[in-house]
Amino acid sequence: MVLILNRTYFPEGTQGTLEWNGTIVCHAIELPWLENQQRVSCIPEGEYVLRKRFSPQVSMAFAFEKCSGKRFNFNPSRQ
């Protein structure tokens, strides 16, 4: 399964749409692109493996994993 994240970058943040086979799965709100600085920048563009993970705060969440072993967490909004 291949998911595509289309993004629009703004100085205040990054907005995206996650799609599968041309169908919108969800919308994403991320931090702005700040050269991949830890905890202040959105995740870099690239190919990732998407894995389910449990989060005590929101129950089900996802992690984007790079082949290098670096992982980025993706959590649903609480609203």
Image (tube, helix red, strand yellow):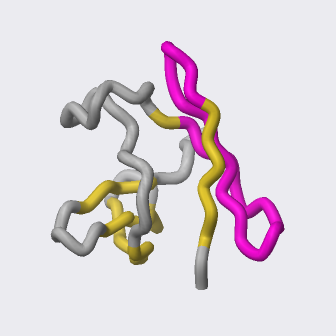
Quadrant containing the N terminus in the rendered view: bottom right
Please give the range of residues in magenta.
9-29
View extreme (top): residue: 11
View extreme (bottom): residue: 1
Percent position of residue 37, x then y = 21, 31
Percent position of residue 7, x then y = 61, 41
Quadrant containing the C terminus in the rendered view: top right
Nearest the eye: 36 or 55: 36
So how many labels did they put on this image? 0
Q: Is residue 25 magenta?
A: yes
Magenta-colored segment: predominant secondary structure: strand
Identify the residue at horizontal 28%, vertical 30% (top origin): 35
Occupied quadrant, residue 5: bottom right
- The relative height of residue 4 versus residue 76 in the rendered view (above or below) is below
Occupied quadrant, residue 16: top right
Identify the residue at horizontal 25%, vertical 61% (top origin): 71
Percent position of residue 24, x then y = 78, 60
Identify the residue at horizontal 32%, vertical 59% (top origin): 56
Please indicate whether residue 73 sits to the left or right of residue 12 in the image: left
